[in-house]
Image (tube, rainbow, N blue to C red):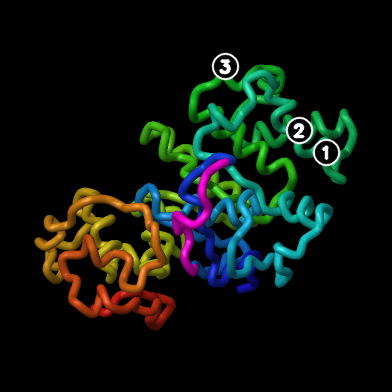
Amino acid sequence: MNSIVAVSDLRKRFNLEAGFFSRFGRFVYAVNGVSFTIGENESFGLVGESGCGKTTTARLLVRMYESDGGKISYRGADIKNFGRAELSRYRAKVKYVFQDPARSLDPRMSVYDVLVSGLRCSALWPGKKQAREKAAAILEEAGLAAGDLERRPAEFSGGQRQRISIARGLIMEPELLVCDEVVSALDVSIQGQILNLLLDLRGRRKLSFLFIAHDLKVASWFCDRIAVMYKGEIMESAPAAGLYKNARHPYTRLLFSAAPNALQADAPRAGAFTAFKGEVRTALAASSGCAFAERCPFAESRCLAGKPELSGDGGHLVRCFL
């Protein structure tokens, strides 16, 4: 399979103290050596608790943030070397759909202006008449009516606003949609409608997805492959069906155990998952051991002393000594 995007050893840290007079030297280590690829017409999931670095990774992908290390390649070209024109073309092909459409859609603009604002500033602008026809067609493809073009985003429900956000991404004819928690704020029934819409779009347009989520069950249903993140590192990566049936890393199994009947009753030491405590803590220093060791009931001395490699076979990779 040809890859659209390839990420290699990606790293990002933020200065802990903000402001003009803040001291430099204390950092939050948000992304720590992440690597993955996304192929043509493939859905790749990044899953983990809030604060694990998955959204930062997604924003690095579109150069919303600049990375501190590693490489992001688009069709074999390093995006860090892109000039303004090349970056504009890249961002037309890799579009970002935000979690909260109420904040990402300008309430002062009509739906039509929301959809074509990026198109109007690009080399793809077809003229007013063709742009309106294209906006109407894409809005209908996203499940709304062409007559909604002159309405304001505030007049729609949360699910409908998310459809507008998806339509805005589609109007540039992208190859890859970065979907950042696009269903997490929606009711369960509406989540299903949006996920089915994305699946239909994938089939019709041969789209690829980077699907960011904290719900491992939803990601397993939607994605082809999944990487589970914790403290800016990938703990486990596998085909979605295999991960659901045979999660190996303690953290992945913890995420599955949060869903009813998701953790197999005969799993080794299944009862020990009640011993997990706490949540993701901000990484204020580069970790020398396993990032998950402080929360893992199975941790041994070697887990604290050394960092396990991400390794395995058959496409199922695990970062764990056990």
Secondary element type, mark 1: loop
Which callout, 2 or 3, points to the residue nearer the camera? 2
Q: Quarter holding the C terminus? A: bottom left
- Farthest residue, direction bottom: 313
Which callout, 1 or 3, points to the residue nearer the camera? 1
In the rendered image of this protein, does residue 96 appear above or below residue 77?
Answer: above
Q: Which residue is mark 1?
A: 121
Q: Name the disc covering residue 155, or none.
A: 3
In the rendered image of this protein, does residue 275 appear above or below residue 301?
Answer: above
Q: Which residue is mark 2?
A: 117
Q: Residue at x 77, y 61 (%)?
A: 82
The spot of residue 294 in percent (x, y) is 23, 63
In the rendered image of this protein, does residue 15 appear above or below residue 140?
Answer: below
Distance from the alpha carbon under mark 2 to that under mark 3: 19 Å
Q: CB atoms at circles 2 and 3 under 8 Å apart? A: no
Left or right: residue 33 versus residue 279 is right
Number of dots carrying numbers: 3
* Sequence-first tag of 2 and 3: 2
Q: Nearer the viewer, residue 220 or 72?
A: 72
Q: CB atoms at circles 1 and 2 under 8 Å apart? A: yes
The answer to which quarter of the image holds residue 147 is: top right
Left or right: residue 60 versus residue 317 is right
The spot of residue 102 in percent (x, y) is 54, 27
Amino acid type of the residue that numbered disc 1 sits on in the rendered structure: Cys
Q: Quarter holding the N terminus? A: bottom right
Q: Which residues are magenta?
A: 21-33
Secondary element type, mark 2: helix
Distance from the alpha carbon under mark 1 to that under mark 2: 7 Å
* Sequence-first tag of 1 and 3: 1
Left or right: residue 266 versus residue 22 is left
Amino acid type of the residue that numbered disc 2 sits on in the rendered structure: Ser
